[in-house]
Amino acid sequence: MPTRNGGARWRECLAGLARQRPAPAALVVIDSGSHDGTREAAERAGARVITVAPEEFNHGEARNRAADALPAVDAIVFLVQDAVPQGEDFLATLERAARQPGVAAATARQVPPRDAGFLTASTVSASPFASGEPRRTGPLSPQQAGELTPERWRPLLLLDDIACAVRADVFRASGYRSTRHGEDALLAYDLLCAGWALCHEPAAVVEHGHSYDADSVVPRYRDDARFFRETFGYRVRPDLLSVLKGYNAELRRDRRWLAEHPGQAPPDAMAAARRLRWSQVLAQREGSRGPLGELPRPRAVPGPLQVPQVPA
């Protein structure tokens, strides 16, 4: 788990992990410069804490380093500091899902925090990771994977290390790529190219959501769009028409959420939604501008035929 000044949500996350039955074999935290007691809270919870300078933090390498510090386990669960596990069997359920025959990784269901505002709740609820239905993506044959365009790859990269589990033997043979953004999408790509399936496990639940406004939303969506343009050769918002379509689609989802949750948002909620969603899609358009990259070369990952398939 990467941390930096996790605050109260981090302590809630630790409390959720402490409730897990069976307890995890180990908890490893990689902290990048906390000064609010985050490291100390982790140590009190029994975690091993590894520190890294903020300027040296890399999402892929940091998680690899933390995983290397774990003992021998069947599955590695990756979390973020503000994802709060729900129930006592979150870890066990997610591990079982990741170790189904033919499956290499499983992502938990994400639900909005209980105190989330309208826009946070609407955004989280619209995510594919909020679904209450199980889902399996893949497996793909080498021919199928080779024929996919960037546009067709994008909706298949359904792995989110906000809360996910990966088979330990597969992960230790590959790990995350070194990257400052999108490490989970790249791992999903490598696993699918190797013939594995990914699954969404709605019975394993975390509370998670970010509260954005029209200014703070910009870097998040701009960087995400830039990542897919540079790394996968895919433009999230290739032109003005896609910006307008995206804007209207976001507002339709927000109106649907308001209709399904009457009285849970202030009267001017849609005015705030229009400001935020316009900033969001413009940020995606900004990140989509520039030279296109190409689909990455898949990494050598042991496939299902090379790994013993023992049901969890």
Image (tube, rainbow, N blue to C red):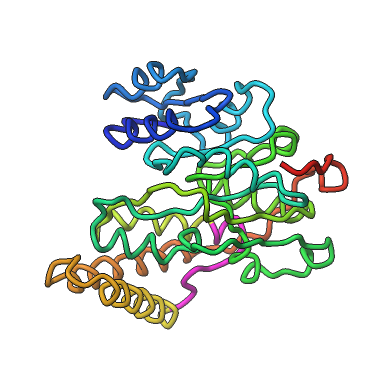
Image quarter for residue 142? bottom right
Give the magenta-colored segment's residue range.
228-239
Question: At which x and y percent is residue 79?
Answer: 48, 39
Q: Is residue 8 above or below residue 115?
A: above
209 horizontally vs 137: left or right: left
Q: Is residue 230 magenta?
A: yes
Which residue occupies the extreme right position in the image?
305
Count of marks overlaid on the render: 0
Q: Quadrant of the C terminus?
A: top right
Q: Is residue 65 above or below residue 185?
A: above
Is 150 in front, or is 202?
A: 202
Is 196 in front, or is 189?
A: 196
Q: Residue at x 27, y 63 (%)?
A: 119
Q: Is residue 159 magenta?
A: no
Q: Residue at x 54, y 64 (%)?
A: 133
Question: At which x and y percent is residue 215?
Answer: 25, 57
Question: At which x and y percent is residue 208?
Answer: 38, 49
154 horizontally vs 147: left or right: left
Is 160 in front, or is 276?
A: 160
Question: At which x and y percent is residue 78?
Answer: 54, 38
